[in-house]
Amino acid sequence: MIKEKEFLDFLLERFKIERERFDRSGVYAYTQRLLAYNSNKIEGSTLTEEQTASLFDNGTLPKSDDYYRAKDVEEMNGHFLMFNKMLDTLDEALSQDLIKQFHYELKSGVFEDRANGYAIGDYKQRPNMIGMYQTVRPEKVEDEINILLEWYLGQDATLAVLAEFHARYESIHPFQDGNGRTGRLILFRECLKNGIVPAVIEDANRNEYLEALKEYREEKSLNKLVRLFEKEQQFYLEKGKYFM
């Protein structure tokens, strides 16, 4: 049986080696495609797993009779860049500046967001909502993220602590757009950084994920979110250990 520490050591080593070698056949490329596809799909991307893989592997999209939405392609490329930024900064403690850097990588190439006047790599300037739920107003975001980070960095990182961080981060909703994707990347990063098998939230479990976040907003309960994270850890572990 593969031990979790063995798996995590393998990931850290192979991510570095395969990225430097432009290797598109190993666990680095698999994880890039897996995380980018699922995280963007949760937010409504129309790109398929095959199209995501083609975009990552060679920068092209398969010939199709359907139209490709420019924003979907731009955000997928942005997610690949955000993942690399995450790898480059694993030695740094999580900070407001780092969170903004992740958002910049995700969104700097998205024409629609720039045309709409969205802040790129900076906190939102207009109020936004999650469905019918109000989120933190723009002028209070920096203080609320600071409070969240101070709390988090004072904890011993566990899956339950990461679940609470994620739920609180999503409730703050610090950016005009891209909150879910930056939040799920931070979840992956902080698992990897703290010796915890990462959780990759699958689009197939989107409803369960949204219900879990709703449960936290309404009841301050993390039960559903922790259970989902545990399930997603096992999914990623089973898929990732194939490459060992």
Image (spheres, rainbow, N blue to C red):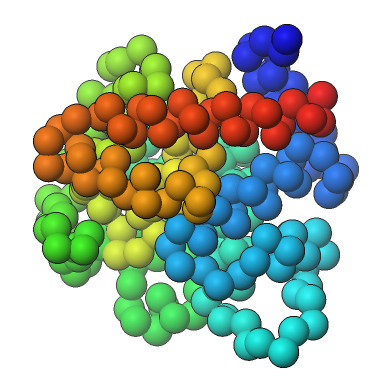
Q: Nearer the viewer, residue 89 or 31?
A: 31
Q: Is residue 232 left or right of residue 127?
A: right
Question: With respect to residue 125, does 37 lie above or below?
Answer: above
Task: Identify the image quadrant of residue 235.
Answer: top right
Q: Is residue 166 left or right of residue 66?
A: left
Asked whether the viewer can see residue 81, the reply is no
Question: With respect to residue 209, does 192 lie above or below?
Answer: above
- Measured as percent of width and height from the top left, residue 201 is found at 49, 43
- Measured as percent of width and height from the top left, residue 86 is found at 56, 41
Total tally of numbered discs in the picture:
0
Asked whether the viewer can see residue 18, the reply is yes
Q: Nearer the viewer, residue 149 or 240?
A: 240
Q: Which image quarter holds the C terminus?
A: top right
Task: Identify the image quadrant of residue 124.
Answer: bottom left
Q: Residue at x 33, y 72 (%)?
A: 118
Q: Residue at x 76, y 37 (%)?
A: 27
Q: Residue at x 75, y 75 (%)?
A: 61
Q: Is residue 119 left or right of residue 6?
A: left
- Measured as percent of width and height from the top left, residue 30 is found at 73, 45
Question: With respect to residue 56, does 30 lie above or below?
Answer: above
- Measured as percent of width and height from the top left, residue 60 is found at 78, 73
Question: With respect to residue 153, does 108 lie above or below?
Answer: below
Q: Residue at x 52, y 20 (%)?
A: 196
Q: Which image quarter holds the N terminus?
A: top right
Q: Nearer the viewer, residue 179 or 44?
A: 44
Task: Identify the image quadrant of residue 85.
Answer: top right
